[in-house]
């Protein structure tokens, strides 16, 4: 077996219950649900209308060019 070194340089979470590990962890421990009616697209032709959307996420804020 080849042992490869791995270095963890940070921790990040993008989730329907929080952006960033602190907000995510706080909401997870408090029992907050990230499931709600989907508003990003029309769900009328789908079996379910609920999902875990990631709201208020600005991609460029976390991943600049």
Image (cartoon, grey):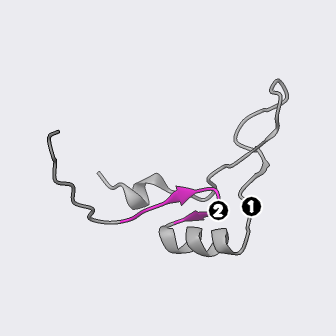
Say left or right for 59 vs 41.
left
Residue at the extreme front of the image, as rendered: 1
Contact flag, marks 2 and 1 (Cβ < 8 Å): yes
The correct choice, above or below, for 46 with respect to 23 in the image is: above
- Direction from residue 29 to residue 21 in the image, left or right: left
Judging depth in this view, the residue of 43 and 9 nearest the camera is 9
Residue 15: image location, x then y, percent:
58, 56
Q: What residue is rendered at 82% in x and 34% in y?
A: 48
Residue 17 forms part of the magenta stretch: yes
Per the image, the residue denoted by label 2 is 17
Rendered view: 31 above or below 50: below
Separation (CA) of disc 2 from disc 1: 7 Å
Numbered range of the magenta stretch = 11-19
| Kind of element beneath mark 1 | loop
Answer left or right for 8 relative to 49.
left
- Residue 32 location, x and y as percent? 73, 67
Residue at 46% across, 53% down: 59
Q: Is residue 23 rendered magenta in the image? A: no
Dot placed on the residue nearer the N-terminal end, 2 or 1: 2
Pinpoint residue 55: horizontal percent, then vertical percent.
64, 56
**Quadrant where the N terminus is found in the figure:** top left
Left or right side of 5 for 59: right
The quadrant in which residue 31 appears is: bottom right
Towards the viewer: 59 or 23: 23
Residue at left 41%, top 55%? Answer: 60
Q: Which mark is residue 59?
A: none
Camera-side residue: 42 or 37? Answer: 37
Q: Residue at x 59, y 65 (%)?
A: 18
The label number, if any, that marks residue 33 in the structure image:
1
């Amino acid at each position: 077996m080849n042992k490869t070194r791995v270095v963890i340089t940070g921790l990040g979470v993008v989730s329907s219950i929080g952006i960033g590990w602190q907000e995510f962890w706080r909401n997870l421990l408090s029992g907050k649900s990230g499931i709600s009616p989907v508003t990003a697209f029309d769900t009328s032709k789908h079996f379910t209308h609920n999902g875990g959307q990631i709201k208020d996420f600005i991609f460029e804020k976390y991943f600049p060019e």
